[in-house]
């Protein structure tokens, strides 16, 4: 069963781009929310993590703050 992958990001975040490139290279479908433009999703991210740093990546029920390739591989079974 494929896990739902969501990334909360901003257009100028280098690590956000790295995470999205990682997902694309590994054929992982994901939903991207631009928290610089979407106040509702920004608030959702803050409530989930108690911080404003991006990227915030949710895989199923797990939340990863920042681009941690090893943790992402583990959670996605790659």
Image (cartoon, rainbow, N blue to C red):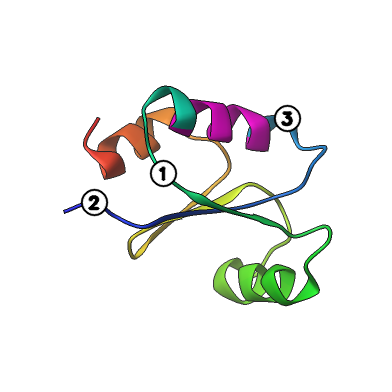
For residue 29, the mark is 1
Q: Are marks 2 and 1 in contact (CB under 8 Å)?
A: yes
The region drawn magenta spans 16-23
SS at circle 2: loop
Looking at the picture, how far across and down is residue 4, in whole percent? 36, 57
Quadrant the N terminus occupies: bottom left
The residue located at (37%, 26%) in the rendering is 26
The residue located at (63%, 47%) in the rendering is 55
In the image, taking residue 62 as reference, residue 18 lies left or right, namely right
Tell me how far mark 1 sits from mark 3, CA to CA: 20 Å
Quarter-wise, where is residue 35 in the image? bottom right
In the image, taking residue 38 as reference, residue 66 lies left or right, namely left
User: Does 24 sit above or below residue 60?
Assistant: above
SS at circle 1: loop
Quarter-wise, where is residue 60 in the image? bottom left
Q: Where does label 2 land, which residue?
A: 2
Residues packed near mark 3 inside 10 Å, few (<14), some (14 to 19) or many (20 plus): few
Looking at the picture, how far across and down is residue 2, in whole percent? 23, 51
Give the foreground label among 3 and 2: 2
Q: Where does label 3 land, which residue?
A: 14
User: Does 65 sit above or below residue 27?
Assistant: below
Q: Are marks 1 and 3 in contact (CB under 8 Å)?
A: no
């Amino acid at each position: 069963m494929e896990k739902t992958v969501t990334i909360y990001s901003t257009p100028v975040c280098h690590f956000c781009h790295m995470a999205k490139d990682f997902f694309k290279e590994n054929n992982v479908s994901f939903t991207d929310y631009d928290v610089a433009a979407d106040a509702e999703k920004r608030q959702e991210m803050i409530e989930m993590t108690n911080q404003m740093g991006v990227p915030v990546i949710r895989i199923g029920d797990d939340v990863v703050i920042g681009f941690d390739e090893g943790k992402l591989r583990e959670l996605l079974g790659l």
